[in-house]
Image: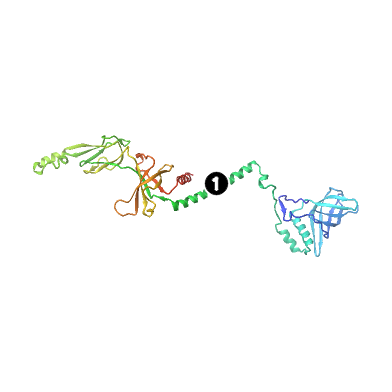
């Protein structure tokens, strides 16, 4: 068999029989071990080697030589550099069999072109020979048992890890696209939402200047003072004295005197909002504080677009999540109404959570969606974290 220089290439006719012997007009030219020039007519030629007749014992089996194959086909004459080894010598008839060694890719292509053309009876031309030598006649060798048969443990592990990463990336991309399509067509999201609870208002019994007595933690007990106020004595007596019963001197004295009072908490509450700042004058009946009872159950107030009218119904289950909480929770719509004040493009919804929601969360923003799945919400949070 001939051994090419590049062991990683296989000729396009590798799968075919390579030793079809043909009688092609050619000569072999080389120097023997004694450096004598030898030239013999070829008896036959194949893709693996050639044979010629030796008149006397000048060669020995196993010897290696370099030389040329000289071809004369019609008007085409050329030489092919070769290396060969004497395979056998038949002493009965002097036949010497030689095997090609180390032929290059160009030499293999030229030799196969000559053999194929001669067998098919085609005319060998210079143009066809040049075209054969210029084109790519070889391809990568096929590995026995597939690529994995020659891979070591590290290469196998690396290939499996890469395949797993590509597979995981494909699954993630598919899930992301599927989640986006589902959210677009099947999920209704609130434009805004917040935690709310019925609040109690602390109002001014009369006009005066307010001073807050709320502790730093904002928690007050029932009956505890939440603010003090000061007002003029004239304001206290207003409505009890007629204009005829007092003179200007008395009015001046009443204005110069002040009366202090205290505002108390109606419940065990937490101060949600202080509407009148310390030292600010407040009119009679003005709300100074909004208090949230500690034992009251918080609800969720949400606002939906009027376009989602068909999706927002009493008794429907929603998925909600407070700001900073990655765990989705369920709730039920208890009331649906248009925004207070007349016709508007917003629908106001009250949602009762399935779990008790502390009044400490009052005023915090909430994400609310209808038709969403808890698993889909968890998937969205995983994507946000990553």
Give coordinates of residue 334: x percent, y percent: 35, 46
**Residue at (80% x, 58% y) in the render:** 79
Is 21 on the left or on the right of 263, as rendered?
right
Q: Residue 238 falls in which quadrant of the image?
A: top left
Q: Nearer the viewer, residue 281 or 331?
A: 331
Residue pictured at 10% horizontal, 44% vertical: 243
Q: Quadrant of residue 306?
A: bottom left
Is 139 situated left or right of 237 in this image?
A: right
Residue at image mark 1: 168
At 8% across and 43% down in the image, what residue appears? 244
Q: Residues within 10 Å of mark 1 (few under 14, many from 20)?
A: few
In front here: 263 or 251? 263
Tell me where residue 94 appears, x and y as whole percent: 89, 53
Instruction: Give the image's coloring scheme.
Output: rainbow
Residue nearest the observer in this picture, 44 or 37 = 44
So how many labels did they put on this image? 1
Report helix, strand or loop for mark 1. helix
Query: Residue 213 at x, y = what percent?
Result: 27, 36
Extreme residue toward the left, this view: 244
């Amino acid at each position: 068999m001939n051994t090419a220089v590049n062991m990683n290439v296989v000729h396009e006719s590798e799968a075919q029989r390579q030793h079809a012997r043909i009688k092609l007009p050619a000569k072999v030219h080389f120097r023997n071990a004694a450096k004598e020039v030898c030239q013999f007519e070829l008896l036959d030629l194949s893709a693996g080697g050639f044979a010629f007749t030796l008149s006397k014992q000048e060669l020995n089996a196993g010897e290696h030589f370099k030389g040329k194959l000289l071809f004369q086909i019609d008007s085409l004459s050329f030489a092919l550099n070769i290396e060969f080894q004497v395979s056998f010598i038949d002493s009965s008839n002097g036949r010497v069999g030689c095997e090609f060694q180390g032929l290059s890719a160009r030499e293999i292509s030229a030799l196969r072109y000559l053999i194929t053309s001669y067998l098919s009876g085609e005319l060998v031309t210079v143009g066809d020979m040049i075209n054969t030598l210029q084109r790519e006649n070889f391809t990568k060798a096929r590995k026995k048992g597939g690529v994995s048969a020659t891979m070591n443990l590290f290469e196998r592990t690396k290939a499996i890890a890469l395949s797993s990463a590509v597979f995981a990336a494909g699954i993630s991309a598919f899930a992301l696209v599927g989640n986006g399509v589902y959210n677009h067509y099947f999920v209704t999201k609130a434009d805004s939402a917040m935690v709310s609870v019925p609040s109690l208002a602390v109002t001014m019994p009369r006009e005066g200047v307010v001073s807050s007595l709320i502790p730093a933690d904002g928690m007050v007990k029932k009956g505890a003072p939440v603010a003090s106020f000061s007002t003029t004595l004239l304001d206290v007596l207003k409505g009890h004295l007629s204009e005829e019963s007092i003179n200007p001197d008395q009015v001046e004295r009443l204005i110069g005197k002040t009366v202090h009072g205290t505002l108390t908490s109606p419940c065990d509450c937490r101060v949600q909002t202080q509407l009148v700042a310390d030292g600010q004058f407040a009119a009679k009946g003005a709300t100074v504080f909004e208090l949230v009872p500690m034992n009251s159950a918080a609800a969720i107030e949400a606002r939906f677009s009027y376009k989602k009218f068909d999706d927002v119904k009493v008794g429907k289950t929603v998925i909600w999540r407070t700001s900073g909480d990655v765990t989705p929770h369920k709730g039920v719509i208890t009331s649906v109404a248009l925004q207070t004040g007349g016709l508007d493009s917003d629908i106001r919804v009250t949602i009762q959570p399935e779990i008790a929601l502390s009044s400490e969360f009052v005023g915090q923003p909430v994400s609310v969606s209808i038709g969403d799945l808890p698993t889909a919400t968890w998937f969205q949070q995983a994507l946000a974290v990553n």
